[in-house]
Amino acid sequence: MTARVLKTADDQYCGNMPFAAVGLPKTGGVGHAEISADGPFFRIPPFPGAQTDGFAAVATLPGEDLGRDDLAGLVRDLRVGGTYWAAQPQLPPKYVLARSHNALRNCSELPKDVPVVLWAQRPTAPSSRSIATVITGDCDPWHMLGRAVAFVTEPADEVRAIAAILGVPTYLSDEATGQIEQQRTDARSVLAEFLAPDVAYLNPFDGHAMSARETAELCGFWRRMIDSNREIACGIGFAFWKQDSVAPLLWSGSEPFAFVRTGPQTVHGAVAIWRSKTPPETISALERRGIRLVEVEDGFLRSKGLGADCIPPLSVTVDRLGAHFDPAQPSELEVLLETASFDAELLARARQIRDLIVNAGLGKYERGRTELGRPAGSRRHILVPGQVEDDRSVQTGGSGMPNIELLRWVREQSPEAYILYKPHPDVLAGHRSGAVAGRDCLDFADQIVTEPPISALIEMVDEVHVNTSLTGFEALMRDKPVTTYGAPFYAGWGLTDDLGPVPSRRSVRRTIDELVAATLLVYPRYRDPLTGIPCPAEVVVARLAADATDSTGLVVAMRRLQGRFMRRLRSIAR
């Protein structure tokens, strides 16, 4: 349910806005029934397409540490609890926030010179105070209390815990007597009232019990993503088979995320675009109107299978500055690598996820740990991955260099080496351009390899030479020397031998753990294929390593059949 704001001269409003009083049973009487509901204080947002609608709970042993010491401070910093994902309607500069007409009655201590904002569930008897604004629907309680000078509610309302944490003076209405009493207890005590005792919530991704702190931190992870999406009004250029996977990662917490075919006439905020699938005239029209464009692209751990086969991504990047592969301007990833500090905890996560990826043999589209023999013995082996020649990453970061020219350049740089060329999977599948005839390829390469997974090839060779291919980043994670001929996002940080036009603005030297932290942990967004909700990177790595993803379906099957047909046509043409 979305929030509605009604400006009224009287006290009339309508709407329905359930709110939870976690850990408290529903009780009789109008005051409690208006506000209380079933559900925990910490909740999973109702992401589009989610396969789970809330935390499962488990009883803990008496005295077991639930991590609740100083929980109020963490909750304040993360701004979680209640419907923290919901709408953020416009509010006056300062106001009294009331949860019902009944709560306002007999409240003589409230400031008289500020307007009253009523945020309630259902009509009640009018109060003696006039109401300036009525709001119905789910709202972010942290936003609703942000500029409040006082808060008036009933004891069962969980929002009073948030008011206590924020230090907003709170007045409680006694439903039996109708009297108003100011809440005197501290934030920690009030919060404890809404946390079920001796109950831990289960991590929705692995089923393990979490402490209260871990639960709050997971909610904070979701809040940060949702808050970053609040300005995005819609998406343009997203293929139909991709939309269900991308929607949870772009959802702003209230309205369903809208995918449109053309630029809307009225836009309040930014527009997310998949640029390669958005008509240039649409982009130009949006730019002329001064509408901010947010670039969305596939992430670096994409899926088990090809995007060209219409297999939806498990990861995307969302960038307000520009695509990470286009060196014409800084991207958010480049700015992150140039300016950010990475703490010990994040670097430890980077080392761990790097080990998980390497040990599982994960690549962007595939996995495998096949041990390969060296075809030329002790001779220096170089892997050259082909790319889709009309891909934006090649056209921008690789200056449009065709695969045959990359091979020619590598051979000139390393005339004595044994060069292995691996065509791009999308090209092999028959969907994209970039195929090199075998006889032409073997003028510069010693061997064309198609079957072994890329991770196995990287581990076998001595070096990897790339234009802008993500294979270079995957090789760095496996401690292999990498030479770049274009300007991929991982070039210019002191980790690669750069022969291409890498921007001089990349001036900081980074470690591989820092590169992995930025590229896999901080910058992209991930969706868990089992629960359908946004998740940390480690969850997707675990799912891919366990083959717990779906790469089947009618659209995928038809796309693969089309690819086989196109490969046959091209072979006849040659």
Image: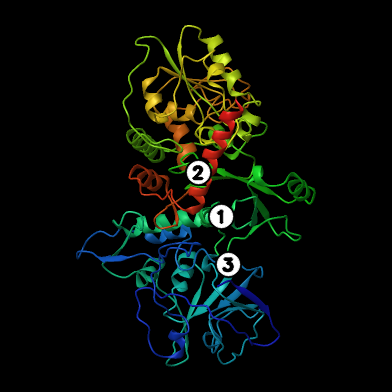
Residue at position x 51%, y 52% from top?
Answer: 555
Residue at position x 41%, y 55% from top?
Answer: 218
Viewer-side label of 3, 1: 1
Horizontal side, residue 368 vs residue 146: left or right? left
Residue 87 is tagged as 3
Residue 243 is tagged as 1
Query: Where in the figure is residue 57, as x and y percent of width and height?
Result: 30, 66
The residue at which mark 2 appears reads as: 560
Q: Nearer the viewer, residue 421 or 491?
A: 421
Q: Earlier in the sequence, mark 3 or mark 2?
A: 3
Question: Considering the numbered disc 1 on the image, is that residue within a helix, a strand or a loop?
Answer: helix
1 and 2 marks in contact (CB < 8 Å): no
Gap between marks 3 and 2 measured at Cα: 42 Å
Gap between marks 1 and 2 measured at Cα: 20 Å
Residue at position x 42%, y 45% from top?
Answer: 537
Q: Nearer the viewer, residue 381 or 355?
A: 381
Question: Considering the numbered disc 2 on the image, is that residue within a helix, a strand or a loop?
Answer: helix
Question: Considering the numbered disc 3 on the image, is that residue within a helix, a strand or a loop?
Answer: loop
In this rendering, does residue 312 appear at all?
A: no
Few, some or many residues within 10 Å of mark 2 (<14, 14–19, 20+): some
Horizontal side, residue 208 vs residue 532: left or right? left
Give the vertical position of 164 relative to 7 (above or below): above
